[in-house]
Amino acid sequence: MPGQGKDGTGHVEIYCSAWKEGGLDAIQRRQPRSPGGRVWPAASRAMRTNQLVKYILFISCYLFWVASGLMIAVGIYAKLSKESGAVESLLAEPSLLVLAVGVLTFVITFLGCTGALRDIPLLLKMFAVLLLLIFVVQIVAVGVAFLFSGLVMDKAAFLMGKAIVSYRDDLDLQNLIDYIQKKFECCGVHSYKDWSQNEYFDCSISNPSLECCAVPFSCCIPEEEQNVLNTMCGYGTQNLKVWKAESLIHTGGCLEKIVTWGRSNLHLIAGLALGFLAMEVVVFSLAVILTYQISFIIQKRTSRKRES
């Protein structure tokens, strides 16, 4: 390659070569050679990046890249599988959020995978900057969630209320609500009488539904040695007093039960969150180290071009 230019011309040419020819690996065959044509071993080792750092970074990015692909698939499936007009305002936001996060993670991890595998400093720098921005956004989001926990609770109660209203409109949503109510042994958002918000379970005289004043079977307390599921176990329970309904169904709301579960498992949740953030810091550090190594090699090659 021509390039005995001054003021960093050789530096720019090596960067261009690393980009056009597929990264630093593609030009590492041009090692300093002895007069007999043999490669100097010491020089060869000095002009290579740390392979451990390189492949740990690549594997880490690859795992997140695969996970982001799964998130995109789930988001697309959730978006396309919903019936027209059914809970569109409830499930549109989560499916679009999953899809957006998946696409963003896919793009960022693709930059990391390609930059680490091909030793392309530009892609590694872009990857590190985007990862740092995401890290900052996560820290800010956690802080805002703690400061405005009341608003978060109100938003959660609002979404759960909409889910109750749309219980019979979407089978996936119905299965999800039944799972939550059975898992946390709860019923409704704040109490079992929240099910009057649903037109099928509405406890009013004008409601012609057979499920009038009922609650879903997932609210029921299972009987011992019950082999056959009684889907009518919650019929008429909204008309009962709390003390009497307690013997048949779970009367407590799911929101309080979920919050209680979160507080009791706070150490586990915090540990997982801190572990994820620590992994991001490690990956960011590896990207910075690899970028520094590539820049150091480029400077070495520039100085040798000038000396020759």
Image (cartoon, rainbow, N blue to C red):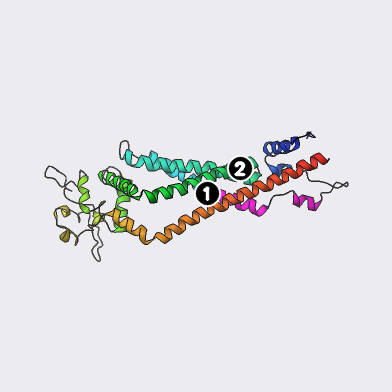
Horizontal relation, residue 23 to residue 103: left or right: right
Residue shown at 35% from the left, 42% from the top: 91
Residue sitting nearer the eye, 45 or 262: 262
State the separation of the CA atoms marked 1 and 2: 18 Å
SS label for mark 2: helix
Cβ atoms under marks 1 and 2 closer than 8 Å: no
Q: Position of residue 251 (x, y in %)?
A: 22, 57
Horizontal relation, residue 79 to residue 29: left or right: left
User: Which amino acid is tagged 2?
Assistant: Lys
Q: Position of residue 273 (x, y in %)?
A: 46, 55
Asked if one can make out residue 81 in the rendered structure from this viewpoint, the answer is: no
Asked if residue 51 lies in the magenta stretch, the reply is: yes
Horizontal relation, residue 72 to residue 228: left or right: right
Residue shown at 57% from the left, 49% from the top: 284
SS label for mark 1: helix
Instruction: Locate the C terminus and report the quarter of the image it occupies.
Output: top right
Asked if residue 45 lies in the magenta stretch, the reply is: yes
Of all residues, the one furthest to the right in this rendering is: 35
Horizontal relation, residue 241 to residue 54: left or right: left
The residue indicated by pointer 1 is: 64
Q: Is residue 25 above or below residue 6?
A: below
Query: Where does the magenta region start and end?
Result: 37-63
| Of callouts 1 and 2, the N-terminal one | 1
Residue sitting nearer the eye, 52 or 143: 143
The residue indicated by pointer 2 is: 125
User: Which amino acid is tagged 1?
Assistant: Phe
The quadrant in which residue 220 appears is bottom left
Q: Position of residue 256 (x, y in %)?
A: 29, 55
Instruction: Locate the N terminus and report the quarter of the image it occupies.
Output: top right
